[in-house]
Every structure is written in structure tokens, then in C-alpha cells.
Amino acid sequence: MTHSRTGQAAPVLPRPDGKGDRTRRRILVAARRTFAQYGYERATIRLIADAAEAHKSSVMQYFGTKEQLFKEAVRFDIPIDELTTPDPASTAENYLRTMLGRWASSPDSPMAVLVRTSMTSEEAAEELRTLVTTQSVDAIAEHIDLPDARIRAGLFSVMMLGIASGRYLLRVPDVSEPDLEDVVRVAAPVIRALISGEPEGRGCAETALGQAEKAETDDAEQGEGEGEGEGEVTVKGGAGAGAGNGG
């Protein structure tokens, strides 16, 4: 035990990577795997303890009940504020890469396990609704300056669940087989339009239209500024070609 300068005993803090922490992490990993395999209803504390090579009492000591263990095992945090930028296009790509990347990191990632178990358990479905609302909808709506911000944030959230489920759980071929960057490239404009309020492709269309109008203006100005002789060369080129073809 160490002592402070006042002579009083200073509290001894547990080591960050102590045996208890390792056991706790091992139980969480086993719990995700067990919940994913058996579902919320059929998974038991004993099954999870066996998978973690731990005693049932240890599981109860760390987490108390199966419900609490489940909530801890599937809890996830999405750093929406860090991923959001002033540019909606960059923001959309950040959201997609981060959320899909987390699913791809492990078949038993917290989000994947939660979605899988929510299909057969109302308790899991309620936990999914809660986490999607607090971690995604609430946070994203704060960055959308539109009257229907929460609707847009909600639609974004369920779209992300659909893309991720189709790619990593259902493994729909045309969604699961393409490279992640291809999925981001195709989906990002849709997400951008949703969170910015601008119609999809509007920015690209306006840019292309602006470039075309500028090109026409430049051509017109160039034509007015060119000498008469240079203009005749152009005409003669066409006429000469015609004459040559006639000869």
C-alpha cells in the first residue's frame, strides 16, 4: 500500500489488464457468440459460462442477470460527432465506412448480434430500437438543420441496418460480394441527399450544367474576338473538304 504526502493511505487502483478484466472480456466475447448462435431466449448463463470457460457464479458476479449481460454484450457507440463534417458528401462516406466497417470486423460484432437476436426476441428488438434511437437517430438529427430532421435521421438509420444486414447477415450476393468501396461509392449519394435535403445528383447536375454554360460563353467570346481571317480559315476548311470530296 502506498501513502500520500499527508500520511494517509492512498487507494490502490486495480490494474487495467488484471485477471478480472480479462475474465470479463472473455465472458462478453462468449456471450456474443452464444446469443448469436442460440438467440436471446435459448441462450443461458450456463451456456455462456461454459463457452467462456468460467464458472456460472463468475458470470453472475460480473453482470448480475442475463438481461444485463446481453445489454452489455451488444452495446455499441457510434462517434457521429467525429464523423460529421461541413461537407455532406464526406459525412455520408464517413458514416458508411465506419458503420459497415464495424460489421465487417467480426461476424459476432455487437451490432450484428443485436440485429440477429432481435429477429426472434422482443427483448432484443426493444434493445435494438433503444440503441438505434440514442446512438444514431438522436445524434444525426442534431446535425440536420431541417424541420423533418428526425424523420431523415430515422430513415438513414434503418437504411444502414438494411445495407449492413443484406451484406453481412443475409449475404445477398449483389450486396455482399462487391468491394466495400464500391458499396460506399453507390450508396453515399443517396445518404448525402437524405442528410442534406438536396435531391440526389443535384450537385453533380448543377456542376455539369454550369460547366456547359461556361464553355458556351467562352466559345462565343472567343468567336467574337477572333479575326476575320481566322474565321475564314475555319469555313474554308469545311468547304475545301467538300471540294476535295467532289474532285
Image (tube, helix red, strand yellow):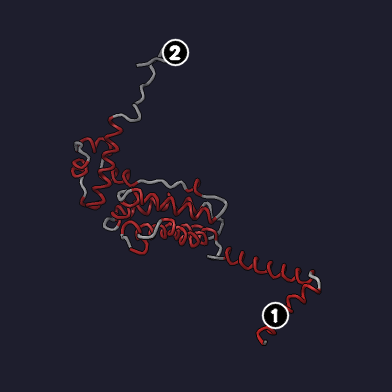
Residue that label 1 marks: 238
Kindly identify the residue that appears in the image at 56 percent across and 53 percent down.
Answer: 87
Nearer-the-camera pick, 1 or 212: 212
Kindly identify the residue that appears in the image at 75 percent across and 75 percent down.
Answer: 233
Please tell me which of labels 2 and 1 falls first in the chain.
Answer: 2
**C-alpha span from label 2 to label 1:** 100 Å
x and y percent of residue 239 in the render? 71, 82
Q: The N terminus lies in which quarter of the figure?
A: top left
Is disc 2 placed on a helix, strand or loop?
loop
x and y percent of residue 6 in the render? 44, 13
Kindly identify the residue that appears in the image at 65 percent across and 69 percent down.
Answer: 212
Using the image, determine if residue 24 lies above or below residue 6.
Answer: below
Q: Amino acid at mark 1?
A: Gly
Q: Amino acid at mark 2?
A: Thr
Residue that label 2 marks: 6
x and y percent of residue 100 in the render? 40, 53
